[in-house]
Image (cartoon, rainbow, N blue to C red):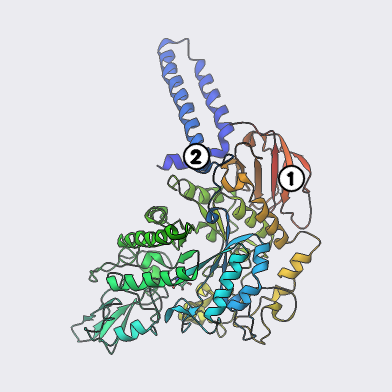
Amino acid sequence: MAWLVKFQSENNKRRKRRVSVGPVCKDGAGLYHVSVQGALFIVFLAFCLGMIIRTDKLLLNTRSLFVGQNHKTAGQKALEWWKTSIIYQIYPRSFMDSIGDGIGDLKGITTKLDYLKDLNVGVIWLSPFFESPMADFGYDLSNQTRVDPIFGTMEDFEILLKTAHAKGMKVILDYIPNHTSDQHPWFIESRKGNSSNPYYDYYVWKDGVVNINKTRSPPNNWRSFFSGSAWQFDENREQYYFHQYLPQQPDLNWRNPKVREEMEGVMRFWLDKGVDGFRVDAIQTLFEVEDVSLNEPRSFKPNVTEEEHDYVRHIYTQNQDETHDVIRSWRQLLEEYELKDGKKRFMVVEVYDEDISQVIKFYQSGADMAFYFDLLFLNRTCGGKCIQAIVNKLLDHLPEGKWPNFVLGNHDNPRIASKMGLEFVNALNTLLLLLPGTPTTYYGEEIGLENIELSYDDTQDPFGRFYGPERYREVSRDPVRSPMQWNHSYQSGFTTASKPWLPIHPMYTVLNVESQSRAKSPSHLKLYRQLAVLREEAAFELGSFEYVLVNDNIFSFVRRVDGQPAYFVAINFGHSVAMEDFRSGADATEGEVVFTTGNFQHHIYEVGQELELENIVLNPGQGIVMRLKNPGLR
Ligand code: NOJ
C-alpha cells in the first residue's frame, strides 16, 4: 500500500496537513451559490471530511505503533530484556588480547565486562570463537562446540559467561548453520564418497555437466558470495559440492534430517552452557532449490562482472520457504528451554534484503528479530527525509506485536564513522539509541572508531584477497575489524604484541576509551553513556514514536507514554545550519534540554537549560533532546 507509506512518511506535516485541508474546502465555498457547483461542493465537502477522518485514523495508527502493544501502565509487567537492552557486538579477534599474541581472546573480553556494564550494554553478542581453520576468521567451523585455542579454553568461556551474568548482562552467540569448514570431520567423511558413510549426504553434492568435448563444468551458474562459481569439484568424490561462501565453507544439506538433528545438538550444547540466545548467521542461504538444472537469471546490475555474486538474481539459492520451517523448529527448541526455567531465549537472524517482506517473514516464522540493516548504508547524501524513509520502511511493515531494531555497523560493512564523518558520530548514536526498538552497536562505535587503511599485502580477509590488488578495497572487511582502542599507550592497550593481527588505527591517541572517559569536554564515549541511560526512560523504551518535522536536514520526533515525561529529539543530518520552529509538530512550546551532542566547536545549548521550541538552531551533526513541558494531549 504505497499511498499509506507515503502518507505516513509525511506524517511530520500533520499540522500543516490539517490546516491545508481547511483552506481547500473554504475555497470551494465560493462556488456555493451556483447550484450545480454547490452540489459538487457538498460532494467535495464530504470527501474532505472523509479524508480528515481517514487522516486521523492513519495518524492514530502511526502513533499507536508502540502504545498499543507495549503500553506500560503502573503494575504492568516490564518489557523483556531483549527489548530494552543495547546489543553490543564483539568481534573477539579484535576486542582485547590477554596473552600478547596480537589476537583478542575470551579472557581479554572478560577483563572488559565492567566497561560494557558501564556503557549500559545489556546483551553481548560474541562473533565466533569456535574451533576453526580461520579461512573466514571463525565463520568456517571445524567444530561448533569447541573453543578455538586462539581464543582460549572452554573454561575461559564459562568464566566469561558467568561473570557477564553476574553483572546482569546476557550473552548471545553466533550460530552458523549454513556451512562448516572443509576441515570439519563431517566434511572429511562426506568427501570420501562412500554412500554407506553416515556423512555421505551431509553436504550438497551434485554431478557436474559433461561437455561435448568431455570437459566438465559446474552444475549451473550459481555464484559464491566471494565471487566465482559456488561449486567446487572434489577429485576424490568426483562430484561438485556447493558453497555459498568460500570453497573452504561447504554448505550443509539441510534436507538431510540428520543434519538438522546435529545442528539442533549444537544449539542445545550452548544453551546447556547457559547462553541466552543466538545471532543466526547467513540464514537466507540455508536452502537452495533441489533442481540444479535451474540457472539463476541475470541481474543486469551495472558494473558487475560475470564472476561476481550480484551477476545473477538469487531466486534459487536464497529465501527458500523451507528456511522458515527450520526457524519454527528452532523457536520450539528455545521455548522448550524457556519452559524449563522461565527464562527467555533470544533469536535474531542476519537478513540482508532490499525487499522488506523477506525480512518480515523471519519475524513471522519465529525469530524475535531479523536484523534491519538499512541504516548500514547511510552516507552523507542521506538527510532527514532519507533517514525517515529508512525508518518507515521497517515500521510500516512490522506486523502487530513485533519489535523493531536498528543497526549502524557490523564486521562486514564499512564503519559508519568513516562513511558519515566523525562530526556525525554523536548524532548517529543519538538516532540509534533513541529510535524505537532494540539498537545494536558494533564495538568501537561508541568512541567513533573508523576504518583502517590496509595494503593488499597486509590484507587478511579472503573476500579482499579474492578480488585481487586492484579491487580489494571495494570488498575487504579488514578495515572494519581493527583492534579496539583502549588507551593512548603502546598498541592502544589492545595487545602487548609488536604486531596485532590487524593494525591499530593511527588516530588511537585521540580516539580511545581512556582519553574519552577522562575528557573534560563531551566525548563520543561520554555522550554514548548518557544516551544509554536516557533510553531507559519509559518514553524511549515503550513510548509512541511521532515525527515532528522532517526535511532534508532535520530528523525529529517525539517519544511519549501516558503519565511519563515526553521527549523531543531533533538531529541535523544535513549539510547546512538549520533553524526551525518545532512547536506545532511537537504539540508543545518549551522543554528542558536533557542531552546535546554538542558539535565540539559551538556549544549552543546546555543540558539543564530551559528552551523554547521556536527557532532551535542545529548545525550539521548536531542533535538535541528535550524533556517537554506541558506537551499537548493527543
Ligand atoms: C555472514 C558473516 O557475517 C560473514 O562475516 C561471513 O563471512 C559469512 N556469513 C559466512 O559465514
Q: Is residue 288 visible?
A: yes
Q: Nearer the viewer, residue 8 or 591?
A: 591
Callout 1 secondary element: strand
Give the answer, above or below, for where 295 lies relative to 402: below
Would residue 585 appear left or right of 413 to someone viewing this image?
right
> Which image quadrant is residue 630 in?
top right
The disc placed on residue 550 is none
> Disc 1 designates what residue?
593
Report the side of 46 relative to 434 (left or right).
left
Q: Residues within 10 Å of mark 2 (few under 14, many from 20)?
A: some
Q: Residue furthest right?
A: 520
The response on whether ligand 1 sits within 8 Å of label 2 is no
Between discs 1 and 2, the one toward the N terminus: 2
Can you tell which quarter of the image residue 561 is in? top right
Q: Which residue is the extreme one toward the front? A: 340
Q: Is residue 619 left or right of residue 233?
A: right
Quadrant where the N terminus lies? top left
Q: Residues within 10 Å of mark 1 (few under 14, many from 20)?
A: many
Disc 2 residue type? Answer: Gly
Up/down of 423 relative to 606, above or below: below
Q: Which residue is mark 2?
A: 68
Task: Find residue 315 and report its image quarter.
Answer: bottom left
Which residue appears at 51% of the width and 34% of the height?
A: 60
Residue 279, percent across and down?
47, 65
Tell me the kind of residue under disc 1: Val
Identify the element where label 2 is drawn: helix
For discs 1 and 2, the disc positioned in front in the rendered view: 2
Q: How far is mark 1 from mark 2, CA to CA? A: 28 Å
Q: Quadrant of the C terminus?
A: top right
Q: Position of residue 92 (x, y in %)?
A: 57, 75
Foreground pick, 60 / 619: 60
Q: Position of residue 94 (x, y in %)?
A: 60, 76
